[in-house]
Amino acid sequence: QVQLVESGGGLVQPGGSLRLSCGASGSIARIYAMGWYRQAPGKQRELVAGITNGGTAKYTDSVKGRFTISRDNAKNSVYLQMNSLKPEDTAIYYCNTARMGDYVPFGSWGQGTQVTVSS
């Protein structure tokens, strides 16, 4: 089982951008699906975006058109480009390996990376 480390979070003003990175301790080439998840204070963790080995992406409705997920199997990394950030995007963001189809996460959770959108 790979260990995952998230990075790239920070404080950004509304309308700003951030790029999150998720580095794996081992190869992700054979992992079919990877996902980015987030948990806001007082809320359940939710899927933000997922991507298959073939590059097919899935997004939750609230981030469609603003976020882009990508993966680089050669670098054992998954990325989340976040544009036009809103205060409601404030959360801890995590990456994880995910079940095919419904993106239910099944790996261990890392520390996550805090994203705060505020003026």
Image (cartoon, helix red, strand yellow):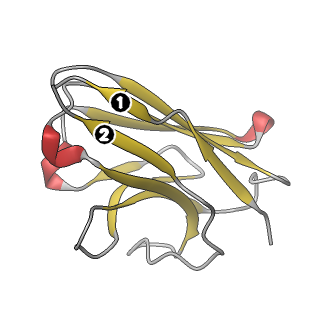
**Secondary structure category for the residue under label 1:** strand
Instruction: Compare marks 2 and 1 and give the one earlier in the sequence.
Output: 1
Residue in the image at 21% along x and 31% along y: 85
Provide the residue designation for mark 1.
Answer: 11
Residue 45, image quadrant = bottom left
Instruction: Rate crowding at label 2 as few (under 14), some (14 to 19) or many (20 or more) other CA atoms within 10 Å.
Output: many
Could you tell me if residue 34 is visible in this image?
Answer: no
Could you tell me if residue 116 is visible in this image?
Answer: yes
Given residues 11 and 48, the one toward you in this image is 11
Residue in the image at 15% along x and 40% along y: 87
Instruction: Rate crowding at label 1 as few (under 14), some (14 to 19) or many (20 or more) other CA atoms within 10 Å.
Output: some
Q: Where is residue 91 in the image (x, y as percent from the top left)?
A: 32, 53
Residue in the image at 22% along x and 45% along y: 89
Provide the residue designation for mark 2.
Answer: 116
Mark 2 and mark 1 in contact? Answer it, CB < 8 Å. yes
Q: Position of residue 39 (x, y in %)?
A: 34, 64
Please, what is the three-letter code of the amino acid marked with disc 2? Thr
